[in-house]
Image: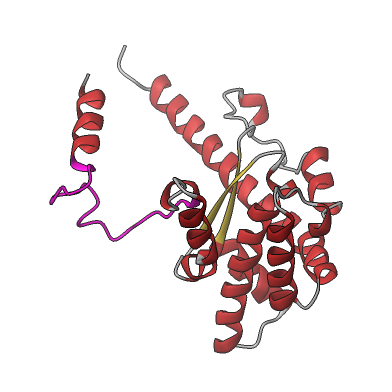
Amino acid sequence: LVAGGALLVWILCSRPGQRYVPWRHSGLTLWMDKCCIDQRTEESKQTGVAYLGDFLHDCDQMVVMLSSSYMKRLWCTYELAMFISNVLRDKANEDQMTEDKIFDVLYKKILFLGFDWPRSHNPIHWMKKVELSAEEQQMLSNYSCRECECAYPEDRELVLAEIRKHFGSEDKFDQFVREKLPRVLLNGKQRYIYRQTWENIIHTVLFLFADP
């Protein structure tokens, strides 16, 4: 009941024209492409899409809600490509980029979260080594931006042109995805699983030592 009331207050305060919005005094903001681009008309949608690079450049971090179709969709991987290009270019301007520094930046800036990653409640699984599934490995090792799905031919050429502009060629971006992103994806999966593991351990200990 309390949670429902809080949600109702949040919704009412979030209506257009409200002076006091819930996030007014928050230092953290969240930009979601699906929710923040006006998709009511084709013109407004294309305007929003045209500024995707600017939106992404202003983002400090990127959370990828990874599904089996994410890396098959050209616009999704376009967003990923632009964000990676932006953060690596900004860091390169500050310091010389080595292989270790590239991964350090990617670990801090990109977090993958899988829809099908388990919340493990079985103690047997708590200490198991976290690895990418065969499907996750194949999704990245076989990646090709040219083979990604895109509804409109003109959008495909636009996106591929941007990828060539930022990475030199489609092949170089494909190579980056195949060689670098498996480690970044595994890092995100480890962070997620280990956090779930420690939460489960803490809850178990609290339960065992709780007053009867």
The colouring scheme, among rainbow, by chain, secondary structure or one colour, is secondary structure
Q: Residue at x 25, y 31 (%)?
A: 7
- For the C terminus, the image quarter is top left
In this rendering, is residue 3 above or below 73? above
Farthest residue, direction top: 212
Q: Nearer the viewer, residue 179 or 143?
A: 143
Examine the residues drawn in magenta and state their main secondary structure.
loop
Res 24 → quadrant: bottom left
Q: Is residue 26 magenta?
A: yes
Q: Nearer the viewer, residue 8 or 102?
A: 8
Q: Is residue 199 magenta?
A: no
Q: Residue at x 30, y 17 (%)?
A: 211
User: How far across and how far down the image is residue 60, in percent?
Assistant: 46, 66
Magenta part of the chain: 13-33
136 on left or right of 171: left
User: How far across and how far down the image is residue 210, in percent?
Assistant: 34, 20
- For the N terminus, the image quarter is top left
Q: Residue at x 17, y 49 (%)?
A: 17
Q: Nearer the viewer, residue 150 or 103?
A: 150
Farthest residue, direction left: 19
User: How far across and how far down the image is residue 131, in percent?
Assistant: 75, 43
User: How far across and how far down the image is residue 35, in percent?
Assistant: 43, 46
Q: Residue at x 66, y 60 (%)?
A: 78
68 on left or right of 9: right
In this rendering, the count of numbered labels is 0
91 on left or right of 162: left
